[in-house]
């Protein structure tokens, strides 16, 4: 008897390994149903296709699998042994497919998630905690970092990105719009006055500003005119840092004005520690997205997690409600 080599889709003798698998499947169905007609019905193919597959299998093996009579097909001794082996192979394959399907359908396993530091700690942390409490079989592996990771190369399932997304093979799901606001402490405004226009912030003026050093141009604060035309002002930086939470604390302490995402400053605004100014100006806004690699079979745990985040942050984000009485 020849050997069945489970080593991938090579072409041997003009037939592929996939053809040999289909031939084995047809052989097993003929034995199970007792006829070529029954096997064809089970497989949803023509009787001639089943007959051809049996002939190809016997030719490949160099052995007769059936004793054929006008009414019936009977297994030879070689055919019986081969049938038992084929049964085990097909059963193992079915079990493997079911295991994968179950893994993709059940919320269990590990989720590797890359998140930006400030947004992750302030807002994704509680969301992840709520999701983990609802799905205790999920294990989280979290990377809090503002760098943009390579999801495929670094082995992440999902990343949260607050940035303009370029062309990519990744799939993106919008979570929320991130607004920016200019604000300062009441003490700072009492001492230096309240700017009335963006031009009041320009370098050489009376105001000290605090800049986010991870921005491409920390001293350039951009906004849009009412008609949508882009504008910018160059501000005098008294301090710069690569962490928005530090800049928020510095502004609360009266060190200057900040242009920050509302998700960082909203609590300080609610407590009266910071006062939004120039709220009629269209300062930058950008969307936060959940991104994940494009794959034919997206695991259910990834899909459920992204759906959960999209639902949690749907509508007006709770961190923007602090601006209602200033607009």
Image (tube, rainbow, N blue to C red):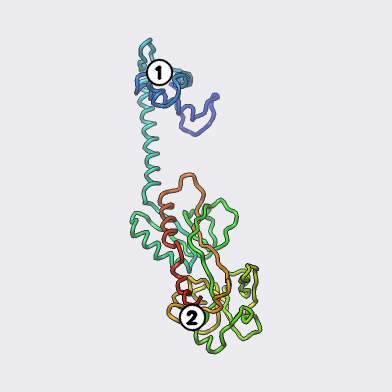
Residue at which label 1 appears = 65
Residue pushed farthest front? 227
Query: Residue 167 location, x and y as percent?
Result: 60, 54
Q: Nearer the viewer, residue 25 or 48?
A: 48
Q: Residue at x 46, y 30 (%)?
A: 5
The residue that appears at 43% across and 52% down in the rendered structure is 303
Q: Residues within 10 Å of mark 2 (few under 14, many from 20)?
A: many
In the rendered image, the vertical position of residue 305 relative to residue 32, given as above or below: below
Which residue is at 58% across, 71% downward? 282
Q: Secondary structure at mark 1?
A: loop
Q: Position of residue 195 (x, y in %)?
A: 58, 83
Judge whether 64 appears above or below 326 on screen. Answer: above
Q: Are marks 1 and 2 in contact (CB under 8 Å)?
A: no
Tell me where residue 112 appears, x and y as whole percent. Answer: 44, 56
Q: Which residue is mark 2?
A: 274
Marks 1 and 2, how far apart in space?
85 Å
Examine the rendered structure and indicate whether residue 130 appears above or below residue 32.
Answer: below
Label count reads 2
Q: Secondary structure at mark 2?
A: loop
Residue in front for this viewpoint, 108 or 277: 277
Q: Earlier in the sequence, mark 1 or mark 2?
A: 1
Q: Quadrant of the N terminus?
A: top left
Q: Residue at x 37, y 51 (%)?
A: 107
Where is residue 7 drawn, in percent x and y? Answer: 48, 33
Please rate how many residues cluster around mark 1, counting C-alpha atoms within 10 Å: few if below 14, some from 14 to 19, many from 20.
Answer: many
From the viewer's perspective, tell me whether residue 201 is left or right of residue 50. right
**As drawn, 82 above or below 93:** above
Nearest to viewer (mark 1 / mark 2): 2
Horizontal side of residue 251 vs 207, given as left or right = left
- Point out which mark residue 27 bears: none
């Amino acid at each position: 008897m020849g050997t069945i080599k489970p080593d991938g889709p090579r072409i041997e003798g003009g037939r592929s390994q996939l053809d040999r698998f289909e031939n084995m499947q047809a052989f097993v169905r003929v034995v199970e149903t007792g006829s070529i007609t029954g096997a064809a019905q089970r497989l949803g193919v023509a009787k001639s296709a089943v007959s051809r597959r049996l002939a190809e299998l016997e030719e490949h093996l160099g052995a007769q699998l059936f004793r054929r009579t006008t009414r019936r097909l009977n297994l030879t001794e070689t055919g019986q042994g081969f049938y038992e082996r084929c049964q085990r192979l097909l059963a193992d394959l079915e079990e493997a497919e079911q295991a994968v399907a179950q893994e993709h359908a059940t919320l269990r396993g590990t989720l590797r998630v890359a998140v930006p530091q400030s947004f992750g700690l302030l807002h994704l942390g509680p969301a992840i905690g709520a999701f983990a409490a609802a799905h205790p079989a999920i294990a989280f592996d979290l990377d809090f970092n503002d760098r943009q990771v390579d999801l495929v190369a670094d082995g992440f399932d999902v990343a949260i990105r607050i940035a303009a997304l370029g062309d990519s093979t990744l799939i993106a799901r919008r979570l929320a719009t991130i607004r920016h606001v200019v604000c300062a402490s009441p003490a700072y405004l009492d001492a230096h006055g309240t700017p009335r226009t963006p031009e009041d912030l320009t370098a050489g003026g009376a105001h000290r500003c605090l800049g986010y050093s991870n921005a491409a141009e920390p001293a350039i604060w951009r906004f849009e005119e009412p008609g949508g035309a882009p504008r910018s002002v160059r501000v005098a930086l008294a301090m710069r840092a690569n962490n928005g939470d530090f800049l928020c604390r510095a502004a609360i302490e009266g060190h200057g004005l900040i242009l920050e995402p509302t998700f960082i400053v909203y609590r300080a605004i609610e407590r009266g520690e910071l006062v939004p100014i120039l709220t009629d100006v269209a300062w930058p806004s950008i969307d936060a997205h959940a991104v994940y690699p494009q794959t034919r079979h997206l695991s259910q745990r990834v899909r459920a997690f992204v759906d959960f985040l999209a639902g949690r942050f749907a509508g007006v984000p709770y961190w923007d409600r602090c601006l209602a009485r200033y607009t």
